[in-house]
Image (cartoon, rainbow, N blue to C red):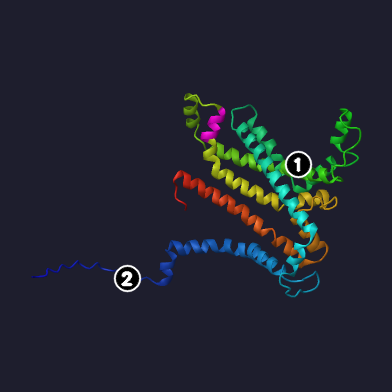
Amino acid sequence: MTTIQTSMPARAVHADTRPLWDRLRTNRNWLALWFMLPAAAFLILFLAYPLGLGIWMSFTDERIGRTGVFVGLENYEWLWSDSIFWLSVFNTLLYTIIASAIKFAIGLYLALLLNRHMPFKAMIRAIVLIPFIVPTVLSAIAFWWIYDAQFSIISWSLIKLGLITQNINFLGDTDWARASVIFANIWRGVPFVAITLLAGLQTVSPSLYEAATLDGATDWQRFRYIAYPLLTPIIAVVMTFSVLFTFTDFQLVWALTRGGPVNATHLMATLSYQRGILSGRLGEGAAIATAMIPFLLAAIAISWFGMQRRKWQQGSDND
């Protein structure tokens, strides 16, 4: 029995004899790394470092003017039994859920309305954007005047209409104060949702709507089976940012109520500022701020899993 041996011609391997620097200059990955370094340095300096420092401070008893020592979970144990902290958690969740849901509903309606052919559409878009471009503190001052217990334009109008007999104390009553700050946040946040969803709607091909119309589809069916599936990724991103912005809101609430009356509008952000900066207990304030991180991560995770589930249903790769 004979064995026939076959040999494949060996491929010539040409070693790159160029100097190391010349090879790196033409390497795309190396060039990409250099372009990313400024952004990475910015994120580390202004995001990662303050975040890490805040988490570390939450485990110390640091105060303004005095270096703290490591106390472990003492600040968190104190917060666990603090009724005001849990009230701020409730207020923050209530504020975020109600405001985000209403902002999405109104923003989606405005986006669908502005996506139609209508006169003065460009002017209406500009008007819709006004609440978003007005500085937050200026908006708060305007709302503070609107909600004023003595000179409120809302109370004056309702009295003239005969609907009420005395002024409403918007910022002095706990329930009215919560409703007032939520309304102010909705007024400021609707333009972001509306304009972003409008941009998404304008990417939908008109031929899809025309084909559905020829098949006898109603306006609701065109939205349900054409616009909504194509908008799902944009809705996930918009709602994620809307929830994050609302959950971490500080300026509007602090300028309007300072967390009052009787801590009824204290959010976690405002309570952290009050305890950490105004009271000087930096460790406790940092612990309250750090306690916000799990909620924020949960919002991001829900959005991410929702988008992955949508990709799976559509048969796309989960890249």
Q: Nearer the viewer, residue 107 or 14?
A: 107
SS of the residue under disc 1 = helix
Residue farthest along the left direction in this orientation: 1
* Image location of residue 69, percent across then percent down: 75, 75
Does residue 272 sit above or below 166 in this rendering? Answer: below
- Foreground: disc 2 or disc 1: 1
Secondary structure mostly seen in the magenta stretch: helix
Which residue type does callout 1 highlight? Phe
* Image location of residue 32, percent across then percent down: 49, 61
Q: Which residues are magenta?
A: 219-226
Query: Which residue is painted at 73% across and 51% down in the image?
Result: 92
Mark 1, other Cα within 10 Å: few <14 / some 14–19 / many ≥20: some
Q: Is residue 208 left or right of residue 237?
A: left
* Image location of residue 13, percent across then percent down: 28, 69
**Residue 52 part of the magenta-drawn span:** no
Which residue type does callout 2 highlight? Ala
Does residue 57 sit above or below 313 in this rendering? Answer: below
* Image location of residue 115, percent across then percent down: 59, 32
Q: Is residue 314 left or right of residue 10?
A: right
Q: How many marks?
A: 2
Q: Which residue is mark 1?
A: 183
**Image quadrant containing the N terminus:** bottom left
Q: Which mark is residue 33?
A: none
Q: Is residue 204 left or right of residue 82?
A: left
Query: Which residue is painted at 65% across and 63% down in the image?
Result: 46
Marks 2 and 1 sit apart, C-alpha to C-alpha, by 68 Å
Q: Which mark is residue 15?
A: 2
**Residue 223 part of the magenta-drawn span:** yes
- Among numbered discs 2 and 1, the one appearing first in the sequence: 2
SS of the residue under disc 2 = loop
Query: Which residue is painted at 71% across and 50% down in the image?
Result: 93
